[in-house]
Image (cartoon, grey):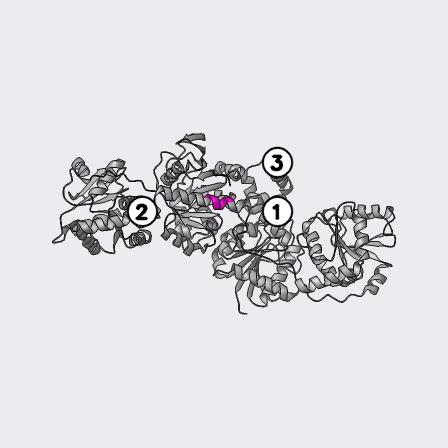
Amino acid sequence: MRDRPSVLVVVQRYGDVSGGAEAHARELVTHLRPYADLAVATTTAADYWTWENVYTAGIDAVDGVPVHRFPVESGRARDFRLREHRAFAKVHPLAAEDAFVRAQGPVAPELLEHLRRFGRDFDAVLFFTYIYYPTVNGLPLVPERAVLVPTAHDEPALRLSVYRRLFHAPRAFAFNSVEERQLIHRTFANERIPGDVVGVGVDVPADRDGARFRARFGIDGPYLLYLGRIVESKGCGTLFDHFLRWQRSGGSTAATLVLAGRGEPEMPVPPDPRIRHVGALSGQQKFDALAGASALVMPSLLESLSMVTLEAWAAERPVVVDARSPVLSSMAARAGAGLAYRSWMEFAEIAELLVTDAALGDRLGRSGARFVEATYTWPVVVEKYRDLFAEVAARNS
Amino acid sequence: MTGRRILLVVQRYGADVVGGSEQHARLVAQRLAQRHTVEIATTTAADYWTWAPYYPAGDDFLDSILIRRFPIAAGRDPEFKAFEHHVLEEEHHVADELAWTTRQGPDCPELLEFLHAHGQEYDAIVFYTYIYAPTALGLPIVPERAALISTAHDEYPLRLAPYRALFHLPRAIGYLTPEERAMVHARFHNEQVPDEVLGYALGDAPPADVEAFRARHGIAGPFVLYLGQVSEGKGCDELINEWIAHREAGGAADLTLVLAGTVRMALPDRPDVRALGRVSEEDKAAALAGAQVLVQPSRLESLGIVLFEAWQYGTPALVHAANPVTAGQTARAGAGRSYADTMFGAALDAVRAERERYGRSGRAYVERECSYAAFDERLERLVEATVRA
């Protein structure tokens, strides 16, 4: 292989778009630039729900990397929920699965044509996210040079027949976590395909000041921090319930639950002075907020990789997770940097411990920093991708 | 029956079905059924071009093996020739390539639904012939328990979109020959998929009464045999040209060229070329046993079963060098020669001159490689590589 492999990145949206996998793709491209000739193939969509055509079709450049955008022929279907319901039914025809994938969108046939014609000009083609049309239909066109970043968690879609081929076709996998790799191997018995736990790198500023955050937002006393969308599907309902029950039970130490994240809350936040929504934070403010927190709370059940969890650990803070989340609870145990609750009473017990015993929080946090250092730093991530690309090239030579 | 639960998926299956891949599929089903529980999933078609419904849909039995026949939703697209030309020869879109499998047929959605609903109930699912829809669309539904028996040769459709991932997906691949294996590896770089070169198996050679055959057809003196469909597609036009050129140069003066098989081309009217049309099993055995040499001019055989059948009787083979499969088989068996263009006569003379030695070598090869015991062993390795650990 040449010293600099040529790599095409395929992802459903790219640029100034929100979304874990999309941000992951863009950050990775930025870090791989010194080591690979990169190009991106994506759609004209910016919104992951409608897939409405927002960007102009054609060649664009983002961070100095050429980005080829292909038009979305059809976005998310109006009857998507119905299609999803039918495909996820215990007994359903194969045809219902095909209908689900189309209804989910973004349907971009010109992106497939691009892959048919030019995919083999690249040493490797890196596909982000297993679930959408570009990967479902694009990866089988270049299996011999495909590296799949599945970003999968244990969800009904993963059990559909239509996705099985995706997990047996690629040359290699880049998993986000040990837990994701176990899930994929357990579900598909595809251990033959090489792969590595790669994930992303976490950059954390050395200067982190909790007092600066408290002063800026007027927060006194101990607080727990939640970072992300305020939405039921991320477990916020459970979080509010458990937090308020803890605070209202006798003998609890007074504390605040600080909510931070972009966008308006997508569910009602209880009108209680002990819950503070501070809105969007800058990068520096986010790390200041982490520095001052007794712990980060991550109530979500369905994560393949939680960026904010890694950031909290990199900032030497512990994380409180729901024991029912297989990825988060297992990662927290491996990292020795988190505590998991099964009920509101366990949540209360853990929260009380962390707001009163600062030394315990610091110890857990430092253990988390060591865990992140071993896997989730950019030099480690870039090195693993270069190894994967070398492996792909060797198998095709 | 004990052992594994195995489903064999193939585009056509039945006593009335003619075709090399289908013949191989039936052999494999029979052999596997000695040790495993075997079922067949197929269509109602018997004709590989139209896929017209022929058998009734539903359960059927052959050789005591359950056959599940699923109805054909659509046969081959009546415009397929034009469509094929467009996809193979002209600028086209990936959507055309993706439509290929369904337009070629047999379009059999209920077979795919069966794999989706019941595939998990089998330990292994063996798919026959890469090119047709039941395999191209069915195997990706159950890759974790699939064995592909691709029966591929180097042809343009192998480059089309529906087949780009097919050779990477299965748990294991059964190739017919080492040449098929090398060709697939060179094209797809799928060496990571475990494989087995299956070859073929033959029972004892049927008795051959050569004198009765000669008497029936009035053939006196030594003869060279071609056995199979007599057509341009099989290279018979080239064979006849080579034959005539050789004779006109003064060679093979005592020989007759006997063509045994359905005639689908014009033939010269000469006493040294005899076309018998389709022959009985008795005639076939006698012709193979009595021939000086079996000639196989086809460039597109993916196995060439007739060579093994000739070798069983100690009859050597003369094959076209342009077909790597039959040329490779003949070289491996040491049972004849291959000829490049214009070298036909010299090669024919050379094989005749050493008929005994080549014949002995061919017979030994078939006894060694095409016995049921040897074939079963190869099949078992394929099954074990396919079954989930």
Is disc 2 placed on a helix, strand or loop? Answer: helix
Question: What chain letter is assigned to the residue under label 1?
Answer: B
Q: Are marks 3 and 2 on the same chain?
A: no
**Extreme residue in the left direction:** A251
Q: Position of residue B174 (x, y in %)?
A: 58, 56
Mark sitting on residue B76: 1
When the figure is inspected, residue B233 is found, relative to residue A59, above or below; the finding is: below
Camera-side residue of A154 and A89: A154
Instruction: Tell which circle, 3 or 1, labels the residue nearer the N-terminal end.
Output: 1
Instruction: Classify 10 Å Cα crowding around label 1: few (below 14), some (14-19), many (20 and above).
Output: some
Amino acid at pointer 3: Glu
Displayed quadrant of residue A134: top left
Contact between marks 3 and 2 (CB within 8 A): the answer is no
Instruction: Classify 10 Å Cα crowding around label 3: few (below 14), some (14-19), many (20 and above).
Output: few
Region of the chain picked out in magenta, as a range? A389-393
Question: What chain letter is assigned to the residue under label 3?
Answer: B
Residue designated by label 3: B90
**Real-space Cα separation, disc 3 to disc 2, in angstroms:** 53 Å
Q: Are marks 2 and 1 on the same chain?
A: no
When the figure is inspected, residue B358 is found, relative to residue A263, above or below; the finding is: below
Left or right: B149 in relation to A325: right
Closer to us: mark 2 or mark 1?
2
Question: What chain letter is assigned to the residue under label 2?
Answer: A
Camera-side residue of A196 and B169: A196
Q: Are marks 3 and 1 on the same chain?
A: yes
Amino acid at pointer 1: Arg
Is disc 3 placed on a helix, strand or loop? Answer: loop
Instruction: Classify 10 Å Cα crowding around label 2: few (below 14), some (14-19), many (20 and above).
Output: many
